[in-house]
Structures are given as structure tokens and as C-alpha cells.
Image (cartoon, rainbow, N blue to C red):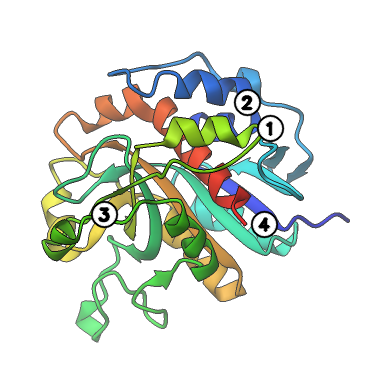
Amino acid sequence: MSSYNTVIICAELTELAPLVSRSWLQECLSHRFSDSYQPLNPEKVLPSPVREVSGLRFYPLDLPEIPGEVLGVQSGVGIVNAARATTVAIEILGAQQIIYSGTAGGLAADSQVGEVIFGDKYVFHSADATAFGYQRGQLPGMPASYAGSEKLLGRARSLLTDADEGALSRGTGSSRFKNLVITGEAAKLAAALQGIPARCGTIATGDSFITDANVSEVRSAFPAALAAEMESAAAAQVAYLSQVSFLAVRCVSDLCSPKGQDVYHGNAAVCGAIAAAATSCLLGTV
């Protein structure tokens, strides 16, 4: 039975498609400066799966920048789906490294649509056991937060420019992707990412889409969180329990606004592609 060192998990097909189809990735990246772009059904670009386990289809990647055995899989949206896919990847496929790639809502005051967040910490914004003495976001018996892989975060930081010191002192430090010195096919992805805002920070996870109706409560409870989505902390918890490296790479698709759902649908494909390109450059960095 084959084992695979790295598995990249995506909640949605629009996030998986740019990992398994180079043409889809390039098409979506070409629209990264558009106000809205909604391509055709991403199922049309899916190759034949390498493995199918418990209904999960694991696909080969069309990313020559990433050496070795790496597979991609769609988990579905939400905490349970994320935990299930991560468990299967680790326990059955033998993955020693899990990456979650996709979109997220921006929580920080200075969040921008198209910004990439490399998660250095993961919390459950919907978890509240404070009545029993736990921190908000902490599950009983578990850490208050889950840390991203230091090795992968080191690679992520090497891709970014240094943040402005004045901005850092105000708590709004911002970086961007460098003019990366990469050769071959990866050079095209590096060029597409150049100048795109990116930083490392906390990602908050819960089983609810964050809009203006609930964003204030999440921001108040987790003021350091940069982004909110519905999978990463669950995957991080499984990886923590299994002692496997984990990192989430998220591209901000909306700003948790009154029209957040419409904005998300208009940006999902492009932001999924930006996250895929960032993930490829991250894993291709040595």
C-alpha cells in the first residue's frame, strides 16, 4: 500500500481545481484583478483519482513545483468533514504533513480581499467552555490553540517581505510576496503572487459563515484573529493528536460584510487559485 508524505485538503471544488489542473489555475489567476469571476463547473477538470477511501477521492496534483508524492482531496465544508478527511489522510494514506488550502473571511480591521493568511495558530471561535475554567475557543482537555508547523511557517516567512515597523507597532503589520527567485514553471506562479498582501496569524474556525450579523462577537472574543473559516482548527486538532505537521493557507475572499455571501461567490475561484499558488510556492521552497 502506497503512503503519501503530504496531502492537501480543500473544502470546495473551486479550491481543489487549481491544484489538479494547471490550466484552471492559470485561468483563475489571470482574473485576479477582476471585481468578480465565476468560471464553469470545476468538476470538468478533475482527473481520475489515485485513491478512493470512505467516499473521499484523492487526486494527483498538476503542480510540477512540488516534488514527491502529494495528493489533493475535497473534504466538504465544516468541522466534521475536515476532521474526517484529515484522519483518513493520516491513518490510511500515511500522510506526515497536512495542508489546508482555500478561502476565508477577513476578520482584521485591515483585511483585504485577495490577501493570503498562513495560519500560525488555530482556534474554535464557536467553542465556549469558559463556565468550566477554559479559555474561549478551547475544548476541554485540549490546548487553547493549535500551532502551525514551524518548519512550514519558516518557509512561508521566507516568501514574504518584511512588514513595516510602524505598522507592526500599531498591530496592523502587513507583508507582501517577494519577487521570488524561482526558476522553471514555478516562476510563473511566483510572478502571479508578487505584490499580493500576505501575513502569518491566527485563524478562527467554526460551523457558521461569518457575516455582519455575527462578526462583532467573533472579533471581540478573538481580537488577534486575522481570518475565519469552517475547517482549519478541526484539521489542526487531528494533526496535533496524531503528531503530524499542519498548516492552513487561506486567501481572503470576503470581509464578513452584509453582502459577504455574494462577495464570496464572486471571488471564490480566484481566491482559491491564489491560495493554491501560495501553497505550491510554499511546498516548493527548500
The residue lying at 23 percent from left, 86 percent from top is 133
Is the residue 243 above or below the residue 283 in the image? below
Mark 1 surroundings: few (<14), some (14-19) or many (≥20) residues within 10 A:
some
Position of 39 with respect to 51 (left or right) is left
| Callout 3: SS | strand
Residue tagged by mark 2?
A: 22
Judge whether residue 273 can be spotted in this image: no
Q: Amino acid at mark 3?
A: Leu
Rendered location of residue 151, percent (x, y): 54, 67
Q: Earlier in the sequence, mark 1 or mark 2?
A: 2
Residue tagged by mark 4?
A: 88
| Callout 4: SS | helix
Closer to viewer: mark 4 or mark 2: 2
Closer to viewer: mark 4 or mark 3: 3
Rendered location of residue 30, percent (x, y): 45, 19
Q: Earlier in the sequence, mark 3 or mark 1?
A: 1
Circles 4 and 2, Cβ within 8 Å, touching? The answer is: no
Residue tagged by mark 1?
A: 62
Instruction: Using the image, tell me which numbered label, if any, was put on residue 226.
Output: 3
| Callout 1: SS | loop
Q: For this rendering, which residue is in front, 55 or 31?
A: 31
Is the residue 106 above or below the residue 267 in the image? below
Mark 4 surroundings: few (<14), some (14-19) or many (≥20) residues within 10 A:
some
